[in-house]
Structures are given as structure tokens and as C-alpha cells.
């Protein structure tokens, strides 16, 4: 007899789930296994020592799963993973979705079933550039966008770039060095130049203090009096616009 969802123990939760792929990691495993293990150790030490990472993080081979009841916790965790990735000259790509999440641990085994994870994997497969994209159907709280105007585009964990809501891959502690690292990666992988050019364009938009917030959200914040109207609003593509 099939059990109802209410009869399943433990019950499934509604969670935000990120699935990220560490790009180029499979090749590293084959070409430099010892170096890859050292990098894994760095990931493990960083995650274990970062008290501000509240979400659950699982890393296996070149895949990362982050889950939490809080969207903010997932975004902050992914932003932190971007830091440790870039400092080791790797980048990540992924998606964040919301839905049912069921997990159980028995002895040394762990079992996970999640439609949110399935959707996050589909997003990761569909995006063509090194970004961690938030599903379009996730309702993002206004206060996450307000952070952009309070702290600037470098420090805020969430950005809107080229019609997509993404986790900020940069931060105040590694923004200055990030451009050089991206250029180095592009030189090492000329076949993927377009992907790195996308990341460089985002870096430039942040450096030039573009809004990187959906225009509809900017309108709402103006009407609410949270921010004041300006004569020009740089679009997420870096070109100034003057909405009526």
C-alpha cells in the first residue's frame, strides 16, 4: 500500500535548494588527483570554519548541493562558495529552486528525494554562462534588493544581470583580484572565452555601479520612498536608460 505524504517519516519539507557544478573539475580529477584532493580539503576547511554559512552543504566530486528553509541562507552559502572557488582558479555554474525536500540518514548512508533539486539541476543544465541562477518562480523578498542600495553592488549577495536573477559571484574581499583570475582562466581555456567574457561583463557592470536590480523592483522602491528617483538608471547590460 502506498503511503501518503503525511505518513512518511520524516515528512518532506519545503526548501530552497541550489545545485552547482564546479566547471572543469572532472578534468582536474583526471589530470591532478592529488591537487584536486587538496582543493577539496580547502573547501571542507572553509565551509566548516565559516560560521555564517547556515545552509546545509554537500559536495561530491564536481557537484555541490546547498539546501535550507531560508533563501537568504542558500544565497549567502553559494556566494561563499564562489569565493573559495575563485581563489583556487575554478568557477561554478548552477541553479536555485524551491520545492519539496526529503532526506534521511541511516548509519553511514544518506537518502535524498527532492523535486526542488530536480528543478535546480535543470536550471544548471540550461544556463550557458558561469552563474548560479535563481528560478523565475521564486518570489524574492524586497529587502534583498534593498541591500544593493544600502551596501552597493559589490557587497550585495543578489544581482539582476541580463534578465536573470543570480547570486553575486563576487564580494568585497575578492572583487579586486577576481578580474585577473578570470583573465587567467580565459587564457588557459580559449575555447570557453565567451563564458569568461560574460563574467567579465558582470564584473565591469558592478565596478561601474550599475543598478543590477529589476526595473520593476526599482519602481516599487521609489514609490515606497526607500530610494529616491534619479534621472538615469543604468540597465543590467551597462547601458543607461531613462524610463518615463
Image (spheres, grey):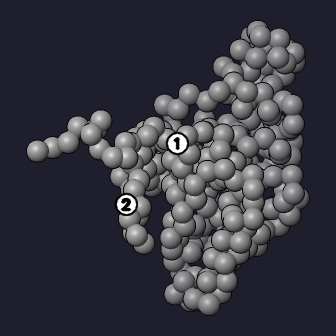
Report the front residue among 182 and 226.
226
**What is the secondary structure assignment of the residue under circle 2?**
strand
Quadrant of the snapshot with the C terminus: top right
Q: Is residue 109 above or below residue 142?
A: below
Report the front residue among 8 and 93.
8
Q: CA distance from mark 2 to mark 1?
A: 17 Å
Residue 42: % across, % down: 71, 75
Residue 237: % across, % down: 71, 38
Report the front residue among 122 and 14.
14
- Work out which residue is located at the far left of the displayed protein and give it: 1
Per the image, the residue denoted by label 2 is 111
Left or right: residue 13 versus residue 134 is left
**What is the secondary structure assignment of the residue under circle 1?**
strand
**Residue under the image location 56 percent in, 45 percent down:** 68
Nearest-to-viewer mark from 2 and 1: 2
**Residue under the image location 73 percent in, 27 percent down:** 143
Residue 96: % across, % down: 53, 45
Per the image, the residue denoted by label 1 is 16
Q: Identify the mark nearer the N-term, 2 or 1.
A: 1
**Residue under the image location 33 percent in, 46 percent down:** 9
Left or right: residue 111 versus residue 72 is left
Asked if residue 128 can be seen in this view, the reply is no
Question: Which image quarter: residue 106?
Answer: bottom left
Asked if residue 70 can be seen in this view, the reply is yes
Q: Is residue 92 above or below residue 244?
A: below
Question: Label 2 crowding class (10 Å Cα cut-off): few <14, some 14-19, many 20+?
Answer: few
Amino acid at each position: 500500500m502506498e503511503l501518503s505524504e503525511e505518513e512518511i517519516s520524516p515528512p518532506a519539507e519545503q526548501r530552497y535548494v541550489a545545485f552547482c557544478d564546479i566547471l572543469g573539475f572532472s578534468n582536474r580529477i583526471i589530470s591532478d588527483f592529488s591537487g584536486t584532493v587538496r582543493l577539496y580539503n580547502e573547501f571542507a576547511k572553509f565551509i566548516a570554519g565559516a560560521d555564517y554559512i547556515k545552509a546545509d552543504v554537500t559536495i561530491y566530486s564536481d557537484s555541490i548541493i546547498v539546501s535550507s528553509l531560508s533563501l537568504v541562507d542558500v544565497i549567502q552559502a553559494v556566494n561563499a562558495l564562489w569565493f573559495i572557488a575563485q581563489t583556487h582558479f575554478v568557477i561554478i555554474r548552477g541553479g536555485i529552486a524551491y520545492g519539496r525536500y526529503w532526506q534521511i540518514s541511516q548509519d553511514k548512508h544518506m537518502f535524498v528525494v527532492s523535486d526542488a533539486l530536480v528543478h535546480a539541476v535543470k536550471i544548471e543544465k540550461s544556463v550557458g554562462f558561469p552563474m548560479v541562477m535563481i528560478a523565475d518562480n521564486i518570489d524574492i523578498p524586497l529587502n534583498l534588493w534593498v541591500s544593493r542600495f544600502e551596501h552597493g553592488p559589490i557587497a550585495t549577495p543578489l544581482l539582476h544581470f541580463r534578465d536573470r536573477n543570480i547570486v553575486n559571484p563576487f564580494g568585497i574581499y575578492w572583487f579586486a583580484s577576481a578580474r585577473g583570475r578570470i583573465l587567467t582562466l580565459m587564457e588557459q581555456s580559449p575555447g570557453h572565452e565567451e563564458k569568461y567574457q560574460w563574467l567579465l561583463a558582470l564584473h565591469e557592470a558592478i565596478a561601474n555601479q550599475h543598478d543590477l536590480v529589476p526595473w520593476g523592483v526599482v519602481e516599487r522602491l521609489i514609490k515606497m520612498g526607500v530610494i529616491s528617483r534619479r534621472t538615469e538608471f543604468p540597465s543590467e547590460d551597462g547601458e543607461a536608460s531613462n524610463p518615463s
